[in-house]
Amino acid sequence: MKGTSVTPPEMWGGIECTVTRIGDGYVDQTFLSGHEHRESDLHAFAGLGIRAIRYPVLWERVAPDGLAKADWRWTDKRLATIRNPGVRPIAGLLHHGSGPRETSLAEPDFP
């Protein structure tokens, strides 16, 4: 159609970042996959042409013991690395996880 601009589709991605609470412990897929220690993964994603990526900014990782003890260092560094080649992060605050330690998914007021 003349005069109509069409935006080409974008490729979006994400990593498996589930943090599962089992009893008093956690199983973190970011550690199990090795991504926790491989910042180079982010450059590889950009090299694949990914323009936006769902990325974990999860309570279980940032503030497992409450916001007063939050540690944003890993998250801040990774989000900056993602943005550098022009990839847009889509921050995920909860992903198939269980939330902060003081919460329970079974409680009706969790959301």
Image (tube, rainbow, N blue to C red):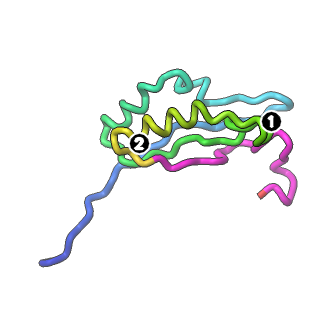
Vertical side of 32 occupied by 13: above or below = below
104 drawn magenta = yes
Q: Which residues are magenta?
A: 89-110
Q: Amino acid at mark 1?
A: Asp
Alpha-carbon span between mark 1 and mark 2: 28 Å
- Using residue 29 as the reference point, say whether residue 45 is left or right of it: left
**Which is nearer the N-term, disc 1 or disc 2?**
1
Q: Amino acid at mark 2?
A: Arg
Vertical side of 107 occupied by 85: above or below = above
Label 1 sits on residue: 65
User: Residue, x 43% and y 35% (percent of image)?
Assistant: 81
- Using residue 54 as the reference point, say whether residue 11 is left or right of it: left
Label 2 sits on residue: 83
Q: Secondary structure at mark 1?
A: loop
Residue 71 x %, y %: 67, 33
Query: What mark, if any, has residue 24 been given in the picture?
Result: none
Residue 54 x %, y %: 50, 46
Residue 40 x %, y %: 41, 25
Magenta stretch mostly in which secondary structure?
loop
